[in-house]
Amino acid sequence: MAPKELKYTKEHEWVRLEGGRATVGITFYAQVQLGDITFVELPKKERKVKQSESIAVVESVKAASDVYSPVSGKVIEVNDTLLDAPETINKSPFDEGWICRISASDPGEAESLMDAASYENYLKELGK
Amino acid sequence: MSTSNHDFKKTPLYNKHVEARARMMAFSGWEMPVQYTGIIEEHLHARSKAGLFDICHMGEFFLKGPSVEENLDKLVTCGIKGMNRGKCRYGFLLKENGGIIDDLVVFKISREEYMLVVNAGTLEKDAKWIREHLSPGNEFSDKSSNIAKIDLQGPLSPKIVSSLFDRPELENLKRFSFTHVDWDGTKCPKGTKIMVSATGYTGEKGYEFFLAVQAAEEVWDALLGFDGVKPVGLGARDTLRLEMGYSLYGHDIDEGHTPLEANLGRFVDMKKAFIGKERLLRQQEEGFSRILTGFVCEGRRSAREHYSVTADNAKAGEVTSGVFSPCLKKGIGLCYIDRKLAIEGREITITDGRVEIRARIKKPPFIQKG
């Protein structure tokens, strides 16, 4: 369930690195835990973020959850379709449900993140 | 899916929820289904077809005796003496100081026999209070562990109920009326009856069934056998009731508030004597500062319980319930607010200290129901 080309955080964010460009979202597991997503607060473009800082808020019917940035850098793009169709994250968490793109200031940071196999193990541990 | 905890009680329908792969959670000491396929989908299904709810956790008390009518009339705020057999009424148990002990529905079976349906979380408290106020010669029995409660709510309900019990007149059972139907099942003795009331907590046409726990799984399966019936969890039960502006005990109403403050005076019969009346009379005379009303948020972002309500930069109240409304696609909720601000359309700001949400006062219900 965890695409092999992505990296993962313990808070269930994923990041796709293409050169210095990082695309960020939340995982399949995260959207299942949240339930129907009803609102997304997107970051402003040009905003600088540090790794692990809260970069977005995802709300479901009953609760709200912070999304923490997997990498440091500057927000260069946000997924506006989530404003009217936040349920896209439930339907396509790794693809159409991307949240924002960051120009990574330190691509080496991603080394500290989990790869797909480690993330899948991590999920198994959580399930126990 | 959370692992089940042996400290929590299971309803007779627990295995059905596990088979259906429902997400379970603890609610008032019970392991209950929050959702099956998704809160929004289940909510919209109940509003367009028929949703089936496991409500076995609620309590059922029976009061029997020559003067139960009198005892009840003093205990609850709704009029008891004027009730006809086969009717039920919504009202409150109040403390001496007018604070709400619980909200409940009273069913008049006969002049000497009533059934009370109470909340799961307040069951022990209610039982103790009622017992203390019952005259000698009258009996109180808590039949909650023998009685299963299942709700069917949605536009398809009337035809389904008439068909299931082979009683065409059930289609037109008046709201707040109840009757008994025969149940010829395999798990209970011959002559078993099910009590069916035209009541509910969703705003839709619907019914509540009270039956022996042995028959619960059978009746659940029989109802699911009808086209258009799907199970609905407590998550959607909450969004459905909030779209109607119905209060939830422990959130919108509690011992710290009177029915007048909760804007539920229509369920109080001020013409009779009842416990807690003095405080209400004083409130009618002297007024009170905050009242319960509804609000709609500007957009999809929802306000949540305990968020502060502000107006003109001053704190004016607090949110008691808040969710995303699947029908309106906006945040909605209930709040206590300074009375002078409880005006239709009044702009308010709701905040948790971090985020600010713009909203407008809207007296519930938030959606129009036939």
Image (spheres, coloured by chain):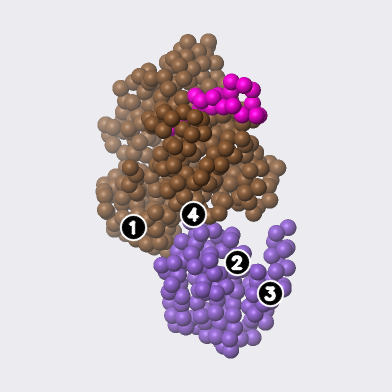
Chain colours: A purple, B brown
The one nearer the camera, B147 or B222, is: B222
Residue B29, picture quadrant: top right
Residue B219 is one of the magenta-drawn residues: no
* Region rendered in magenta: B180-200
Q: Kindly identify which residue carries mark 1.
A: B359
Discs 2 and 3 lie in a common subunit:
yes
Whole-percent x, y for residue B347 in the image: 29, 57
Between circles 1 and 2, the one closer to the viewer is 2
- Per the model, the C-alpha gap separating discs 2 and 3 is 13 Å
Whole-percent x, y for residue B24 in the image: 61, 49
Q: Amino acid at mark 1?
A: Ala
First reached walking from the N terminus: tag 4 or tag 1: 4
Q: Are marks 4 and 1 in contact (CB under 8 Å)?
A: no
Q: Quadrant of the N terminus of chain B?
A: bottom right
- Per the model, the C-alpha gap separating discs 1 and 3 is 42 Å
Q: Amino acid at mark 2?
A: Phe
Say if B193 sits above or below B150 in the image: above
Chain for numbered disc 3 = A
Chain for numbered disc 1 = B
Q: Kindly identify which residue carries mark 3.
A: A116
Q: Quadrant of the C terminus of chain B?
A: top left
